[in-house]
Amino acid sequence: MASSHPFELRWGIISTGKIARSFVADLLIDPKSRNVHDVVHKVIAVGSRNLATAEEFVNEYVKCEKSIRAYGSYGEVYADKDVDVVYIGTPHAFHYENALGAIKAKKHVLCEKPVTLNAAELRSLLDAAKEQGVFFMEALWTRFLPITMEIKKLAESDCGLGEPVALQADLSIYFRLDELPKTHRLLDPYLGGGALLDLGPYPLLWAILALYEHPSNKNSRPSHVTGAMLRTPLTGVDRSTSFIVTFGTTSSSASNTLAAQAVLSCNFHTPSFQDGVVIRYENGVIVVHAPIFRPKAFTVQWYDPDEPGDIVHEDIERFDYVGNGMYFEADEVARCVRDGKMESEVWGHDKSLLEMMIFDEIRQQNGYEFPPGVEKVDSGQYTLCKHNHPSPAPGK
Ligand SMILES: NC(=O)C1=CN([C@@H]2O[C@H](COP(=O)(O)OP(=O)(O)OC[C@H]3O[C@@H](n4cnc5c(N)ncnc54)[C@H](OP(=O)(O)O)[C@@H]3O)[C@@H](O)[C@H]2O)C=CC1
Ligand SMILES: O=C1OC[C@@H](O)[C@H](O)[C@H]1O
Protein backbone atom coordinates (compact mmCIF):
# COMPACT_ATOMS: atom_id res chain seq x y z
CA MET A 1 0.00 0.00 0.00
CA ALA A 2 1.32 3.48 -0.85
CA SER A 3 2.61 5.52 2.12
CA SER A 4 0.47 8.49 3.11
CA HIS A 5 3.64 10.51 3.79
CA PRO A 6 5.42 12.00 0.79
CA PHE A 7 8.99 10.84 0.20
CA GLU A 8 11.41 13.68 1.04
CA LEU A 9 14.49 14.05 -1.18
CA ARG A 10 17.30 16.13 0.33
CA TRP A 11 19.29 18.16 -2.22
CA GLY A 12 22.83 19.53 -2.26
CA ILE A 13 23.42 22.19 -4.91
CA ILE A 14 26.74 22.62 -6.70
CA SER A 15 27.41 26.16 -7.97
CA THR A 16 25.47 29.40 -7.70
CA GLY A 17 25.07 30.42 -11.35
CA LYS A 18 22.03 31.24 -13.44
CA ILE A 19 20.60 27.76 -13.79
CA ALA A 20 21.30 26.74 -10.19
CA ARG A 21 19.16 29.71 -9.10
CA SER A 22 16.29 28.72 -11.39
CA PHE A 23 16.48 25.10 -10.25
CA VAL A 24 16.50 25.93 -6.52
CA ALA A 25 13.63 28.37 -6.96
CA ASP A 26 11.64 25.50 -8.52
CA LEU A 27 12.61 23.02 -5.78
CA LEU A 28 11.13 25.40 -3.22
CA ILE A 29 7.71 25.48 -4.90
CA ASP A 30 5.26 23.31 -2.97
CA PRO A 31 4.65 20.12 -5.05
CA LYS A 32 0.96 20.25 -4.06
CA SER A 33 0.66 23.34 -6.28
CA ARG A 34 1.21 21.00 -9.26
CA ASN A 35 -0.94 18.27 -7.75
CA VAL A 36 2.04 16.15 -6.71
CA HIS A 37 1.54 14.49 -3.33
CA ASP A 38 3.98 11.56 -3.28
CA VAL A 39 7.31 13.44 -3.15
CA VAL A 40 8.70 16.64 -1.62
CA HIS A 41 12.06 18.37 -1.97
CA LYS A 42 14.29 19.91 0.68
CA VAL A 43 17.35 22.01 -0.13
CA ILE A 44 19.98 21.09 2.46
CA ALA A 45 23.19 22.69 1.20
CA VAL A 46 24.67 24.95 -1.46
CA GLY A 47 28.33 24.83 -2.43
CA SER A 48 30.27 27.48 -4.28
CA ARG A 49 33.96 28.01 -5.01
CA ASN A 50 33.60 30.98 -2.70
CA LEU A 51 31.89 30.91 0.73
CA ALA A 52 30.57 34.48 0.46
CA THR A 53 28.88 33.63 -2.85
CA ALA A 54 27.27 30.55 -1.31
CA GLU A 55 26.06 32.62 1.67
CA GLU A 56 24.63 35.29 -0.61
CA PHE A 57 22.81 32.59 -2.60
CA VAL A 58 21.37 31.04 0.57
CA ASN A 59 20.24 34.42 1.91
CA GLU A 60 18.17 34.91 -1.21
CA TYR A 61 16.09 31.85 -0.26
CA VAL A 62 16.05 32.28 3.52
CA LYS A 63 12.40 33.28 3.57
CA CYS A 64 11.39 29.93 2.07
CA GLU A 65 13.93 27.59 3.62
CA LYS A 66 15.61 28.75 6.84
CA SER A 67 18.17 26.03 7.25
CA ILE A 68 20.12 25.80 3.98
CA ARG A 69 23.85 25.31 4.69
CA ALA A 70 26.35 27.41 2.72
CA TYR A 71 29.73 25.86 1.88
CA GLY A 72 32.82 27.45 0.30
CA SER A 73 33.65 24.28 -1.66
CA TYR A 74 31.82 21.63 -3.63
CA GLY A 75 33.52 18.84 -1.67
CA GLU A 76 31.75 19.86 1.53
CA VAL A 77 28.38 19.35 -0.18
CA TYR A 78 29.37 15.86 -1.33
CA ALA A 79 30.50 15.08 2.22
CA ASP A 80 27.35 16.38 3.94
CA LYS A 81 25.69 13.32 5.47
CA ASP A 82 22.22 14.85 5.18
CA VAL A 83 22.47 15.27 1.40
CA ASP A 84 20.87 12.47 -0.65
CA VAL A 85 21.29 13.87 -4.15
CA VAL A 86 23.64 16.41 -5.70
CA TYR A 87 22.50 18.80 -8.45
CA ILE A 88 25.35 19.99 -10.68
CA GLY A 89 24.96 23.38 -12.37
CA THR A 90 28.57 24.19 -13.32
CA PRO A 91 29.73 24.83 -16.93
CA HIS A 92 29.87 21.66 -19.05
CA ALA A 93 33.65 21.26 -18.77
CA PHE A 94 33.30 20.51 -15.04
CA HIS A 95 30.32 18.16 -15.14
CA TYR A 96 32.54 15.09 -15.28
CA GLU A 97 34.74 15.92 -12.29
CA ASN A 98 31.86 17.32 -10.20
CA ALA A 99 29.61 14.32 -10.88
CA LEU A 100 32.47 11.93 -10.13
CA GLY A 101 33.15 13.70 -6.83
CA ALA A 102 29.52 13.32 -5.81
CA ILE A 103 29.27 9.70 -6.96
CA LYS A 104 32.43 8.74 -5.07
CA ALA A 105 30.78 10.16 -1.94
CA LYS A 106 27.84 7.81 -2.69
CA LYS A 107 25.44 10.60 -3.58
CA HIS A 108 22.79 10.32 -6.27
CA VAL A 109 23.35 12.84 -9.08
CA LEU A 110 21.30 15.09 -11.33
CA CYS A 111 23.73 16.76 -13.74
CA GLU A 112 22.95 19.66 -16.09
CA LYS A 113 22.94 19.24 -19.86
CA PRO A 114 25.07 18.43 -21.78
CA VAL A 115 25.80 15.73 -19.24
CA THR A 116 29.51 15.59 -20.14
CA LEU A 117 31.80 16.80 -22.94
CA ASN A 118 31.95 13.43 -24.69
CA ALA A 119 30.65 9.87 -24.55
CA ALA A 120 33.84 8.54 -22.97
CA GLU A 121 33.41 10.82 -19.94
CA LEU A 122 29.79 9.71 -19.62
CA ARG A 123 30.66 6.00 -19.83
CA SER A 124 33.21 6.50 -17.07
CA LEU A 125 30.57 8.23 -14.88
CA LEU A 126 28.02 5.49 -15.54
CA ASP A 127 30.56 2.85 -14.50
CA ALA A 128 31.29 4.79 -11.32
CA ALA A 129 27.57 5.24 -10.55
CA LYS A 130 26.99 1.53 -11.02
CA GLU A 131 29.93 0.67 -8.79
CA GLN A 132 28.65 2.97 -6.02
CA GLY A 133 25.02 1.94 -6.51
CA VAL A 134 23.72 5.47 -7.01
CA PHE A 135 21.12 7.04 -9.30
CA PHE A 136 22.43 9.20 -12.14
CA MET A 137 20.53 11.37 -14.62
CA GLU A 138 21.17 14.20 -17.07
CA ALA A 139 18.97 17.21 -16.26
CA LEU A 140 17.14 17.26 -19.59
CA TRP A 141 14.15 18.89 -17.92
CA THR A 142 12.14 19.48 -21.12
CA ARG A 143 11.62 15.72 -21.46
CA PHE A 144 9.68 15.71 -18.15
CA LEU A 145 7.28 18.57 -18.89
CA PRO A 146 3.62 17.45 -19.03
CA ILE A 147 3.35 18.86 -22.57
CA THR A 148 6.24 16.64 -23.70
CA MET A 149 4.67 13.60 -22.04
CA GLU A 150 1.39 14.38 -23.79
CA ILE A 151 3.06 14.72 -27.21
CA LYS A 152 4.76 11.34 -26.78
CA LYS A 153 1.50 9.70 -25.72
CA LEU A 154 -0.33 11.13 -28.70
CA ALA A 155 2.44 10.28 -31.19
CA GLU A 156 2.50 6.66 -30.10
CA SER A 157 -1.29 6.25 -29.85
CA ASP A 158 -3.55 5.05 -32.65
CA CYS A 159 -4.77 8.60 -33.32
CA GLY A 160 -4.30 8.16 -37.06
CA LEU A 161 -1.05 10.07 -37.61
CA GLY A 162 0.77 6.92 -38.73
CA GLU A 163 4.54 6.48 -38.72
CA PRO A 164 6.94 9.40 -38.30
CA VAL A 165 8.72 10.26 -41.53
CA ALA A 166 10.68 13.47 -40.95
CA LEU A 167 11.38 15.96 -38.17
CA GLN A 168 12.77 19.47 -38.12
CA ALA A 169 13.87 21.14 -34.90
CA ASP A 170 15.83 24.26 -34.18
CA LEU A 171 16.91 26.11 -31.10
CA SER A 172 18.42 29.50 -31.76
CA ILE A 173 19.11 32.28 -29.30
CA TYR A 174 20.60 35.64 -30.22
CA PHE A 175 23.28 35.91 -27.55
CA ARG A 176 25.06 39.06 -28.83
CA LEU A 177 28.35 37.18 -28.75
CA ASP A 178 30.36 40.31 -29.64
CA GLU A 179 29.34 41.83 -26.32
CA LEU A 180 30.27 38.81 -24.18
CA PRO A 181 33.70 38.40 -22.63
CA LYS A 182 35.67 35.67 -24.40
CA THR A 183 35.80 33.87 -21.06
CA HIS A 184 31.99 33.50 -21.00
CA ARG A 185 31.00 29.81 -20.87
CA LEU A 186 29.23 30.07 -24.25
CA LEU A 187 32.40 31.29 -25.97
CA ASP A 188 35.30 29.82 -24.02
CA PRO A 189 36.60 26.50 -25.41
CA TYR A 190 38.13 25.80 -21.98
CA LEU A 191 34.57 25.77 -20.57
CA GLY A 192 33.23 23.57 -23.39
CA GLY A 193 31.73 26.55 -25.26
CA GLY A 194 29.81 26.48 -28.52
CA ALA A 195 26.25 26.08 -29.81
CA LEU A 196 26.19 22.30 -30.29
CA LEU A 197 26.86 21.38 -26.68
CA ASP A 198 24.85 24.24 -25.19
CA LEU A 199 21.72 24.30 -27.39
CA GLY A 200 22.04 21.04 -29.35
CA PRO A 201 20.58 18.81 -26.59
CA TYR A 202 17.14 20.39 -27.12
CA PRO A 203 16.53 19.77 -30.86
CA LEU A 204 18.10 16.36 -30.36
CA LEU A 205 15.83 15.45 -27.46
CA TRP A 206 12.80 15.95 -29.73
CA ALA A 207 14.34 13.66 -32.35
CA ILE A 208 15.08 11.10 -29.66
CA LEU A 209 11.51 11.33 -28.35
CA ALA A 210 9.74 11.17 -31.73
CA LEU A 211 12.10 8.83 -33.62
CA TYR A 212 14.49 6.89 -31.36
CA GLU A 213 11.78 6.19 -28.77
CA HIS A 214 9.13 5.36 -31.39
CA PRO A 215 8.04 1.72 -31.01
CA SER A 216 8.83 0.91 -34.65
CA ASN A 217 12.47 1.95 -34.11
CA LYS A 218 12.96 -0.78 -31.48
CA ASN A 219 15.57 1.35 -29.67
CA SER A 220 17.93 1.16 -32.67
CA ARG A 221 20.67 3.74 -32.90
CA PRO A 222 20.70 6.04 -35.96
CA SER A 223 22.15 4.60 -39.15
CA HIS A 224 23.79 7.90 -40.17
CA VAL A 225 24.70 11.20 -38.54
CA THR A 226 26.05 14.11 -40.57
CA GLY A 227 26.82 17.54 -39.20
CA ALA A 228 28.35 20.84 -40.24
CA MET A 229 29.71 23.40 -37.80
CA LEU A 230 30.17 27.12 -38.40
CA ARG A 231 32.67 28.66 -36.04
CA THR A 232 32.98 32.16 -34.66
CA PRO A 233 36.33 33.84 -35.20
CA LEU A 234 35.94 35.28 -31.68
CA THR A 235 37.21 32.09 -30.00
CA GLY A 236 36.80 29.29 -32.57
CA VAL A 237 33.80 27.62 -30.88
CA ASP A 238 30.79 26.77 -33.10
CA ARG A 239 28.39 29.67 -33.53
CA SER A 240 25.93 27.38 -35.25
CA THR A 241 25.70 23.69 -36.06
CA SER A 242 23.28 21.83 -38.33
CA PHE A 243 22.99 18.06 -38.28
CA ILE A 244 20.97 15.28 -39.84
CA VAL A 245 20.17 12.15 -37.86
CA THR A 246 18.85 9.26 -39.95
CA PHE A 247 16.99 6.28 -38.55
CA GLY A 248 16.62 3.38 -40.97
CA THR A 249 17.06 -0.34 -41.22
CA THR A 250 20.52 -1.36 -42.26
CA SER A 251 19.70 -5.00 -43.02
CA SER A 252 16.68 -6.85 -44.37
CA SER A 253 16.53 -9.04 -41.25
CA ALA A 254 16.41 -6.09 -38.83
CA SER A 255 13.31 -5.79 -36.63
CA ASN A 256 13.25 -1.99 -36.66
CA THR A 257 11.02 -0.65 -39.42
CA LEU A 258 11.30 3.09 -38.85
CA ALA A 259 12.62 5.08 -41.81
CA ALA A 260 12.86 8.74 -40.85
CA GLN A 261 15.25 11.67 -40.78
CA ALA A 262 15.67 14.51 -38.31
CA VAL A 263 17.12 17.79 -39.56
CA LEU A 264 18.34 19.65 -36.49
CA SER A 265 20.06 22.95 -35.85
CA CYS A 266 21.21 25.31 -33.15
CA ASN A 267 22.47 28.83 -33.48
CA PHE A 268 23.85 31.51 -31.13
CA HIS A 269 23.36 34.30 -33.67
CA THR A 270 19.63 34.51 -34.46
CA PRO A 271 16.37 34.11 -32.52
CA SER A 272 14.25 30.94 -32.89
CA PHE A 273 11.35 30.46 -35.29
CA GLN A 274 7.79 30.31 -34.00
CA ASP A 275 7.57 26.62 -34.99
CA GLY A 276 10.36 25.10 -32.94
CA VAL A 277 9.76 21.43 -33.76
CA VAL A 278 7.85 20.00 -36.70
CA ILE A 279 7.23 16.24 -36.55
CA ARG A 280 5.86 14.97 -39.85
CA TYR A 281 3.91 11.71 -39.97
CA GLU A 282 2.42 9.72 -42.84
CA ASN A 283 -1.01 11.23 -42.17
CA GLY A 284 -0.36 14.52 -40.42
CA VAL A 285 1.97 16.70 -38.42
CA ILE A 286 2.70 17.79 -34.84
CA VAL A 287 4.10 21.29 -34.45
CA VAL A 288 5.66 22.15 -31.09
CA HIS A 289 5.66 25.89 -30.54
CA ALA A 290 8.88 27.68 -29.58
CA PRO A 291 10.75 27.87 -27.29
CA ILE A 292 11.50 24.18 -27.66
CA PHE A 293 13.11 23.93 -24.22
CA ARG A 294 9.85 25.01 -22.55
CA PRO A 295 6.99 24.87 -25.05
CA LYS A 296 3.54 25.87 -23.86
CA ALA A 297 1.51 24.72 -26.86
CA PHE A 298 1.46 22.26 -29.70
CA THR A 299 -0.70 21.92 -32.82
CA VAL A 300 -1.75 18.64 -34.43
CA GLN A 301 -3.02 18.50 -37.99
CA TRP A 302 -4.50 15.45 -39.73
CA TYR A 303 -4.42 15.13 -43.54
CA ASP A 304 -7.20 14.08 -45.87
CA PRO A 305 -6.40 10.41 -46.63
CA ASP A 306 -7.24 11.04 -50.30
CA GLU A 307 -5.28 14.28 -50.58
CA PRO A 308 -2.18 14.04 -48.36
CA GLY A 309 -1.23 17.53 -47.23
CA ASP A 310 -4.83 18.84 -47.19
CA ILE A 311 -5.72 19.42 -43.56
CA VAL A 312 -9.07 17.97 -42.46
CA HIS A 313 -8.74 18.48 -38.72
CA GLU A 314 -6.60 20.57 -36.38
CA ASP A 315 -6.21 20.61 -32.57
CA ILE A 316 -4.19 23.03 -30.45
CA GLU A 317 -3.28 22.06 -26.90
CA ARG A 318 -1.96 24.60 -24.41
CA PHE A 319 -0.15 24.04 -21.11
CA ASP A 320 0.90 26.30 -18.28
CA TYR A 321 2.61 25.98 -14.92
CA VAL A 322 4.10 28.13 -12.19
CA GLY A 323 7.85 28.73 -11.95
CA ASN A 324 10.30 27.43 -14.53
CA GLY A 325 9.00 23.86 -14.79
CA MET A 326 12.24 22.23 -13.64
CA TYR A 327 10.52 20.58 -10.69
CA PHE A 328 9.09 17.93 -13.00
CA GLU A 329 12.57 16.44 -13.52
CA ALA A 330 13.23 16.80 -9.76
CA ASP A 331 10.02 14.85 -9.03
CA GLU A 332 11.27 12.10 -11.35
CA VAL A 333 14.60 11.96 -9.48
CA ALA A 334 12.78 11.72 -6.14
CA ARG A 335 10.57 8.85 -7.35
CA CYS A 336 13.52 6.97 -8.82
CA VAL A 337 15.58 7.36 -5.63
CA ARG A 338 12.58 6.37 -3.49
CA ASP A 339 12.11 3.25 -5.63
CA GLY A 340 15.81 2.31 -5.60
CA LYS A 341 16.30 2.85 -9.35
CA MET A 342 19.71 3.63 -10.83
CA GLU A 343 18.27 5.45 -13.86
CA SER A 344 15.09 7.04 -15.13
CA GLU A 345 12.93 5.19 -17.62
CA VAL A 346 11.99 8.52 -19.19
CA TRP A 347 15.47 9.94 -19.84
CA GLY A 348 17.72 6.97 -19.14
CA HIS A 349 21.43 6.42 -19.58
CA ASP A 350 21.03 5.11 -23.16
CA LYS A 351 19.56 8.43 -24.30
CA SER A 352 22.28 10.58 -22.73
CA LEU A 353 24.86 8.23 -24.22
CA LEU A 354 23.25 8.47 -27.65
CA GLU A 355 23.28 12.27 -27.35
CA MET A 356 26.98 12.34 -26.49
CA MET A 357 27.85 9.85 -29.25
CA ILE A 358 26.02 12.00 -31.81
CA PHE A 359 27.84 15.12 -30.61
CA ASP A 360 31.19 13.24 -30.71
CA GLU A 361 30.46 12.12 -34.26
CA ILE A 362 29.62 15.66 -35.43
CA ARG A 363 32.70 17.09 -33.73
CA GLN A 364 34.89 14.43 -35.27
CA GLN A 365 33.49 15.03 -38.76
CA ASN A 366 34.32 18.72 -38.36
CA GLY A 367 37.72 18.37 -36.68
CA TYR A 368 36.29 20.24 -33.69
CA GLU A 369 38.49 19.70 -30.66
CA PHE A 370 38.62 21.29 -27.24
CA PRO A 371 42.02 22.40 -25.94
CA PRO A 372 44.17 19.59 -24.48
CA GLY A 373 43.08 18.52 -20.99
CA VAL A 374 39.55 19.95 -21.19
CA GLU A 375 38.04 16.53 -21.88
CA LYS A 376 38.93 14.47 -18.82
CA VAL A 377 38.47 11.12 -20.56
CA ASP A 378 39.69 10.81 -24.16
CA SER A 379 37.05 10.31 -26.83
CA GLY A 380 38.90 7.33 -28.35
CA GLN A 381 37.20 5.57 -31.25
CA TYR A 382 33.90 6.84 -32.64
CA THR A 383 31.55 3.92 -32.89
CA LEU A 384 28.07 5.38 -33.34
CA CYS A 385 27.32 4.70 -37.00
CA LYS A 386 29.29 1.95 -38.71
CA HIS A 387 27.86 3.15 -42.02
CA ASN A 388 29.02 6.76 -41.85
CA HIS A 389 31.69 7.52 -44.41
CA PRO A 390 34.67 9.36 -42.99
CA SER A 391 34.60 12.96 -44.15
CA PRO A 392 37.72 14.92 -45.08
CA ALA A 393 39.25 16.73 -42.09
CA PRO A 394 38.21 20.39 -42.33
CA GLY A 395 40.63 23.14 -41.42
CA LYS A 396 40.34 24.60 -37.94
N1 LIG B 1 18.50 23.28 -18.00
C1 LIG B 1 18.57 24.51 -18.48
O1 LIG B 1 17.58 25.11 -18.89
C2 LIG B 1 19.85 25.21 -18.51
C3 LIG B 1 21.02 24.50 -18.32
N2 LIG B 1 22.21 25.13 -18.32
C4 LIG B 1 23.41 24.35 -18.13
O2 LIG B 1 23.90 24.64 -16.82
C5 LIG B 1 25.30 24.79 -16.80
C6 LIG B 1 25.64 26.16 -16.21
O3 LIG B 1 25.06 27.18 -16.98
P1 LIG B 1 24.75 28.65 -16.34
O4 LIG B 1 24.04 28.51 -15.06
O5 LIG B 1 24.13 29.43 -17.42
O6 LIG B 1 26.23 29.17 -16.09
P2 LIG B 1 26.70 30.33 -15.12
O7 LIG B 1 27.98 30.83 -15.70
O8 LIG B 1 25.63 31.28 -14.85
O9 LIG B 1 27.02 29.55 -13.75
C7 LIG B 1 27.96 28.54 -13.65
C8 LIG B 1 28.43 28.43 -12.22
O10 LIG B 1 29.38 27.37 -12.17
C9 LIG B 1 30.37 27.64 -11.20
N3 LIG B 1 31.70 27.50 -11.80
C10 LIG B 1 32.64 26.59 -11.43
N4 LIG B 1 33.76 26.73 -12.12
C11 LIG B 1 33.56 27.76 -12.97
C12 LIG B 1 34.39 28.41 -13.92
N5 LIG B 1 35.66 28.04 -14.14
N6 LIG B 1 33.86 29.42 -14.61
C13 LIG B 1 32.60 29.82 -14.41
N7 LIG B 1 31.76 29.25 -13.49
C14 LIG B 1 32.25 28.24 -12.76
C15 LIG B 1 30.11 29.06 -10.69
O11 LIG B 1 29.49 28.93 -9.43
P3 LIG B 1 30.32 29.18 -8.07
O12 LIG B 1 31.08 30.44 -8.30
O13 LIG B 1 29.26 29.29 -7.08
O14 LIG B 1 31.20 28.00 -7.84
C16 LIG B 1 29.14 29.66 -11.68
O15 LIG B 1 28.27 30.56 -11.09
C17 LIG B 1 25.75 24.57 -18.25
O16 LIG B 1 26.25 23.28 -18.38
C18 LIG B 1 24.50 24.75 -19.09
O17 LIG B 1 24.48 23.93 -20.24
C19 LIG B 1 22.26 26.49 -18.45
C20 LIG B 1 21.15 27.25 -18.64
C21 LIG B 1 19.85 26.66 -18.74
O1 LIG C 1 19.86 25.07 -21.48
C1 LIG C 1 19.82 26.16 -21.99
O2 LIG C 1 18.60 26.66 -22.30
C2 LIG C 1 18.41 27.91 -22.84
C3 LIG C 1 19.63 28.80 -22.96
O3 LIG C 1 19.31 29.98 -22.26
C4 LIG C 1 20.91 28.30 -22.36
O4 LIG C 1 22.04 28.88 -22.98
C5 LIG C 1 21.05 26.85 -22.36
O5 LIG C 1 22.17 26.44 -21.60
Image (cartoon, rainbow, N blue to C red):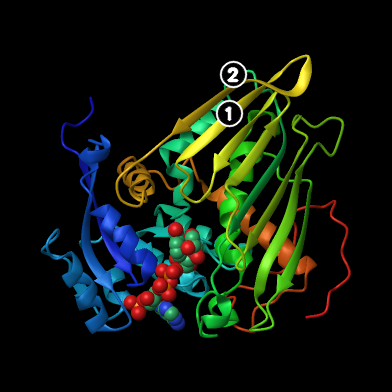
Pointer 1 local density, CA inside 10 Å: few below 14, some 14–19, many at least 20: many
Q: CA distance from mark 2 to mark 1?
A: 11 Å
Q: The residue under label 1 is which amino acid type?
A: Val
Residue depicted at 64% across the width and 83% down the height: 235
* Between discs 2 and 1, the one toward the N terminus: 2
Which residue, given by chain and number where applicable, does mark 1 sit on?
Answer: 300
Q: Quadrant of ligand 1?
A: bottom left
Image coords of residue 75 (percent x, y): 32, 76
Image quarter of residue 260:
top right
Image quadrant holding the N terminus, namely top left
The image quadrant of residue 332 is top left
Placement of 249 over or under 377, stated as above or below: above
What residue sits right under mark 2 in the picture? 159
Question: How crowded is the residue under tag 2: few (<14 C-alpha within 10 Å), some, or many (20+)?
Answer: few
Q: Is residue 227 above or below residue 231?
A: above
Q: Quadrant of the C terminus?
A: bottom right
